[in-house]
């Protein structure tokens, strides 16, 4: 009884403090408060919406508010216990925020860090700032700038795709139903296990289940103002999952250090080793002396690339099965007869396949929701005149940017890969097809500025490669054809219920 009383009193005191703090720092434009979205309640603000709506409904709400009410106008949202916050929808304002990354402008801030550092750690690239962040960013850039990406595409992808190929061939023969989300996730887990840790990591490894559970709960923390209470009262399973993830990261680094000390390549990776090309743990150990930082960082890289890429492949296949008229965009450029290599998958040689991939991410961005905080101790003023006190939370929703009719036109909700294609007649009268370029502030799927996604090119080439392999050999039919699918609650944008298909061998 006493425990309940103490918890209730502490929560109430915390709530009142946060409410008072929130009210004493006002966000203004032209000296007036900003508009609030319809349905904002006195005291509760938009808190109930955040607490009760599933994530996709919340993203649909942001899209509707942008298209039907506020357009590019920055508006205010409020949630009890949270610092004052705004939602940004204008590309110009977003460009400014992306450019002003850092302690004098905007950064992850305590709001993001507090919710994510159980899983991501304080020192990995996702939460680090200053020198520690720069060092990891440099190591990541070095990894992708060298021949690693080419080795991945030409050697690692075909090797890891072998299991998927066998499963799809068997399904075509036996009529077995395949969940393509699971199949793609197994592939991306193995590729990212190889990139981050230099090992062959299956999705059936206990690390993967623990990581999935901890990610889903971390995602929900951003919607639940009472997440801390939840964590202290019911967080046992979450703590266990995080401890499995951390132990795994530490063990990988310990083995890598051992191998380097003994100069023995077999120590690092044991029976799961892959010896084709370098890996990030090695590169990070060259740059960062603290082993716990390397462990956090490697887990961060794995989490940045594993689910995002599997999500995107699943949504592409779903949209192509909904609108098969766009399948030739891929099969014409990536015919069954050709070998697809890193060199042959450039945007110049496969613009239409890239268009399908980018168009899918416009509608289903794997990182659908982003937030930063004003780090500048004097606050910040946005180009539209919005004055932000220090620690204000700044939110934008790439999902809503992708569905903006002001940016993409009235057909913004339609899947139309051709909107990415630029055709021009060259001098010899042949049509030249080129991929259109969109700025990061109109298409914030990979973020922009100093913190833009390090794995963008890898994600594109992986998506196009996998779709080429999938569509040149098999035909797919969704088992439950129920129209556009929804996403389930998570940190990224997985498909609710997976993508279950029947498979037939393609007659080429
Ligand atoms: C379709 C797939 C992908 C999408 C949509 C995507 C999107 C993003 C976004 C939006 C961010 C910024 C997140 C933030 O604000 O903190 C980000 C950061 C990052 N991404 Fe990706 N990503 C994808 C795939 C990958 C892959 C394959 C890797 C490979 C390792 C990767 C590595 C990273 C890293 C390391 C960061 C942190 C960068 C930093 O903070 O400096 N991503 N990504």
Image (cartoon, helix red, strand yellow):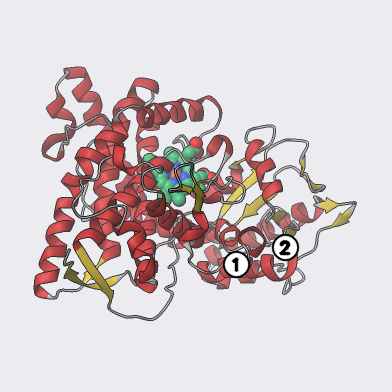
In the picture of the structure, the residue carrying the numbered disc 1 is 50
Q: Position of residue 464 (x, y in %)?
A: 33, 51
Res. 356 image quadrant: bottom left
Query: Does residue 9 lie above or below 323 as drawn?
Result: above
Q: Which residue is drawn at 79% across and 48% down?
A: 384
The furthest residue to the front: 428
Residue 209 in view here: no
**Residue drawn at 44 percent across, 36 percent down:** 124
Q: Can you give x and y, in whole percent of width and height, for residue 264 in the image?
A: 14, 22
State ligand 1's quadrant.
Answer: top left
Q: Residue 253 in the image: state x and y as whole percent.
A: 28, 31
Q: Quick one: 129 or 221, which is closer to the camera?
A: 129
Q: Mark 2 points at which residue?
A: 71
Q: Position of residue 366 (x, y in %)?
A: 45, 56
- Earlier sequence position, callout 2 versus callout 1: 1
Where, quadrant-wise, is the C terminus in this rendering?
bottom left
Residue at 60%, 58% (x, y): give it: 401
Q: Considering depth in this image, is 49 or 96 the residue closer to the camera? A: 96
**Mark 2 CB in 8 Å range of ligand 1?**
no
Residue 166 as seen in the image, left or right of residue 61: left
Q: In the image, which is nearer the foreground, mark 2 or mark 1?
A: 2
Label 2: which secondary element? loop
Judging depth in this view, the residue of 438 and 278 nearest the camera is: 438
Q: What element carries label 1?
A: helix
């Amino acid at each position: 009884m006493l425990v309940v009383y103490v918890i209730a009193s502490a929560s109430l005191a915390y709530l009142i403090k946060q409410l008072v703090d929130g009210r004493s720092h006002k966000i203004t434009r032209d000296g007036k408060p900003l508009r609030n979205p319809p349905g904002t309640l006195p005291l509760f603000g938009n808190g109930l919406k955040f607490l009760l709506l599933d994530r996709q409904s919340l993203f649909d709400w942001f899209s509707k508010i942008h298209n039907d009410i506020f357009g590019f106008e920055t508006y205010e949202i409020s949630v009890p216990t949270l610092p004052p916050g705004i939602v940004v929808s204008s590309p110009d304002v977003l460009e400014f925020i992306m450019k002003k990354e850092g302690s004098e402008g905007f950064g992850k801030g305590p709001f993001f860090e507090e919710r994510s550092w159980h899983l991501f750690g304080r020192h990995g690239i996702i939460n680090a700032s200053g020198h520690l962040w720069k060092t990891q960013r440099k190591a990541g850039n070095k990894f992708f700038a060298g021949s690693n990406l080419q080795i991945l595409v030409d050697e690692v992808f075909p090797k890891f795709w072998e299991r998927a190929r066998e499963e799809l061939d068997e399904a075509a023969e036996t009529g077995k139903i395949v969940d393509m989300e699971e199949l793609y996730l197994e592939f991306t887990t193995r590729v990212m296990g190889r990139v981050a840790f230099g090992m062959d990591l299956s999705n059936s490894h206990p690390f993967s289940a623990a990581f999935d559970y901890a990610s889903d709960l971390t995602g929900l923390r951003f919607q639940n103002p009472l997440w801390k209470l939840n964590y202290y009262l019911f967080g046992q399973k979450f703590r266990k999952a995080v401890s499995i993830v951390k132990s795994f990261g530490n063990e990988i680094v310990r083995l890598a250090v051992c191998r380097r000390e003994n100069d023995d390549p077999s120590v690092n990776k044991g029976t799961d080793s892959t010896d084709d090309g370098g890996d990030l743990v090695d590169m990070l150990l060259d740059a960062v002396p603290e082993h716990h930082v390397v462990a956090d960082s490697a887990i961060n890289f794995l989490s940045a690339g594993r689910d995002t890429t599997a999500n995107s492949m699943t949504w592409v296949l779903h949209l192509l099965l909904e609108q098969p008229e766009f399948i030739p965009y891929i099969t014409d450029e990536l015919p069954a007869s050709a070998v697809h290599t890193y060199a042959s998958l450039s945007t110049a040689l496969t613009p239409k396949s890239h268009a399908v991939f980018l168009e899918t991410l416009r509608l289903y961005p794997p990182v659908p929701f982003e937030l930063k905080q004003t780090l500048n101790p004097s606050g910040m003023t946005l180009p539209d005149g919005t004055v932000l006190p220090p620690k204000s939370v700044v939110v934008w929703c790439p999902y809503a940017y992708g569905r903006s009719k002001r940016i993409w036109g009235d057909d913004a909700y339609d899947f139309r890969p051709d909107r990415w294609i630029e055709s021009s007649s060259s001098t010899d009268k042949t049509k030249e097809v080129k991929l259109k370029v969109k700025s990061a502030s109109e298409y914030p799927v990979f973020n922009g500025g100093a913190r833009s996604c390090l794995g963008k090119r890898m994600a594109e080439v992986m998506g196009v490669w996998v779709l080429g392999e999938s569509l040149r050999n098999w035909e797919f039919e969704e088992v439950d054809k129920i129209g556009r699918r929804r996403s389930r609650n998570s940190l990224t944008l997985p498909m609710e219920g997976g993508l279950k298909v029947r498979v037939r061998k393609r007659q080429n």
